[in-house]
Image: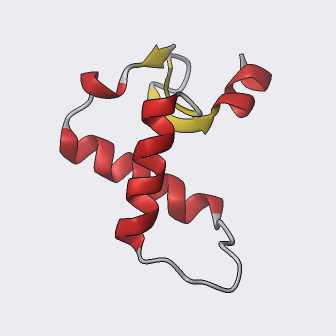
Amino acid sequence: MIIPPDQVSADALGGLIEEFITREGTDYGQIDFDLSVKVEQVKHQLDKGDIVIIFDSITESVNLMTKHQYQEWS
């Protein structure tokens, strides 16, 4: 189930975003961006719908996925 970003507290959303960034191990090329810049980029992607917040009822967990990952998962 997709959860709209405005239904998640700011603290919880921040934690989800930071976990997503560190889990993905994203390579930004030769330029190393600060965590705050990466967080803003992910927030922007959430706003655009490129990344979605997912609640998995089987594991009772919340996660961020790219839209493509969600389409493969669901």
Query: From the viewer's perspective, is 30 left or right of 21?
Result: right
Q: Residue at x 27, y 25 (%)?
A: 6
Q: Residue at x 42, y 32 (%)?
A: 47
Residue 18 position in % (x across, y down): 41, 58
Q: Residue at x 69, y 72 (%)?
A: 27
Examine the image and state in which quarter residue 3 appears.
top left
Examine the image and state in which quarter residue 4 appears.
top left
Depth check: 20 or 27 in front? 27
Task: Identify whether 65 is placed above or below 39.
Answer: above
Query: From the viewer's perspective, is 68 left or right of 4?
Result: right
Q: How is the image coloured?
A: secondary structure
Q: Would residue 21 be seen by someone viewing this image from the given angle?
A: yes
Q: Would residue 62 be seen by someone viewing this image from the given angle?
A: no
Residue 8 position in % (x across, y down): 26, 29
Query: From the viewer's perspective, is 7 left or right of 64?
Result: left
Residue at the farthest right position:
72
Residue 57 position in % (x across, y down): 50, 16
Which corner quadrant holds the C terminus? Answer: top right
Depth check: 4 or 19 in front? 4
Depth check: 18 or 58 in front? 18
Residue 63 position in % (x across, y down): 50, 36
* Tally of marks: 0
